[in-house]
Image: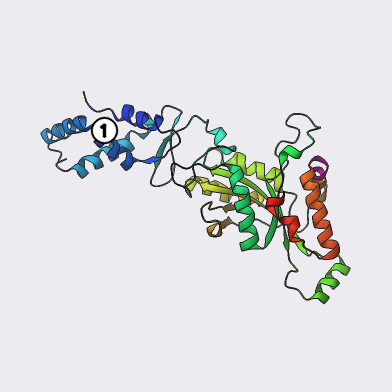
Amino acid sequence: MALSITKVVPELLSNNPEKRFTAREIAKWIFENYRQDCEEKRARSTAKKIPLDTDDALIQQLVAEIGSQRRSITRNSKIRATEGRPRRYYYSELSEDDEVDPGNLPTKATSESKHIREHDLYPLLSNYLRDELDVFSVRIDEKRATNRRGQNGNRWLFPDLVGLEDLSATWDRETKDCVREFGDTRAKLWSFEVKLHLNSTNVREAYFQTVSNSSWANLGYLVAAEIEGRLTMQELRTLSGVHGIGVMELNPSSPSDSQILIPARERQSVDWLSADRLVQENSDFLQYIKVVRHFHQTGDLRKSDWDYNNR
């Protein structure tokens, strides 16, 4: 019986949930585990004058067949194929919609067998913001919300992190005092929504969640550890052109190598009405606003207020 790519590939993937394989890795596995079938395939190809006289040639033929039968392989909704190159195949019990939510998803910055949670990204992002962008940030825990508006009353209300950028950090004391007397801006407020994984399926939901919970700030960013595929980036550029939320890519294994892919469009003033809604609903955000007020009143950016590990 001829080797069936559409049967053996799901077998490999389902036995290794969430682990991602290139077509060549799958082909090598087939060659090693279905050797007799592969030799029969070689014999048939010789009869048809299709040269598969070397092992590499046979493996490359399997790679080509995996690619040509991709749609049949992924007919099972739990078998997925990524958009990028090289394309990777994997098995997941999560629905495609659930991939936007926190969970154990692999990222390109980790080994394929290692998993990372969304919450693991928060302190990494906080360190990157402080060390590379001079933005001091704190976590906003949605569990500290009042929830007095009922179920889903605060849906998409709270960002994951909020920050402050001290514009006056290098100013002379006289300049700082003068600006304080005039009541001019000495800081920018930042807001961040963090995701493990963005693809063409979940990118719009994640982006509009960020629009919802970050539009109060001077600068709002959607941050992801993995952004999959050309179409996903194209969609992000289109949405950012309209709504102004920026996009960062966070490298979990080397946060200093993270980067801003799409700069946020700055709001000239904070939407204080929206900010007040967050103050009234969440004690973490209330504390954040108290620290911002203290900075504007005194010019003192107390580093202990921005220590992620203390919160």
Q: Residue at 72% of width from left, 72% of height from top?
A: 170
Residue placed under numbered mark 1 in the picture: 33
Q: For label 1, count other residues whose C-alpha is less than 10 Å away and answer few (under 14), some (14-19) or many (20+).
A: few
* Residue 69 seen anywhere in this rendered image of the structure: yes
Measured as percent of width and height from the top left, residue 74 is found at: 40, 31
Quadrant for residue 178, please give it.
bottom right
Queried whether the magenta region covers residue 197, the answer comes back as no
Looking at the image, residue 155 lies above or below residue 185:
above
The colour scheme used to paint the residues is: rainbow
- Quadrant hosting residue 202: top right
Q: What residue lies at 29% left-to-right and 37% top-to-bottom?
A: 29
Q: Residue furthest top?
A: 1
Count of all numbered marks drawn on residues in the image: 1
Quadrant of the rendered image containing residue 172? bottom right
**In the rendered structure, which segment of residues is drawn in magenta?**
277-282
* Main SS of residues in magenta: helix
* Residue located farthest toward the right when viewing the structure as drawn: 181
Q: Position of residue 177 (x, y in %)?
A: 85, 72
**Foreground residue among 148 and 111:** 111
Q: In percent of the image, x 61 and y 41: which residue is there? A: 206
Q: Find numbered disc 1 in the image and state the secondary structure of the residue it sits on.
A: helix
Residue 36, how many percent across, how many down? 19, 30
Q: Position of residue 299 (x, y in %)?
A: 81, 65
Badge 1 amino acid: Asn
Q: Is residue 229 above or below residue 255?
A: above
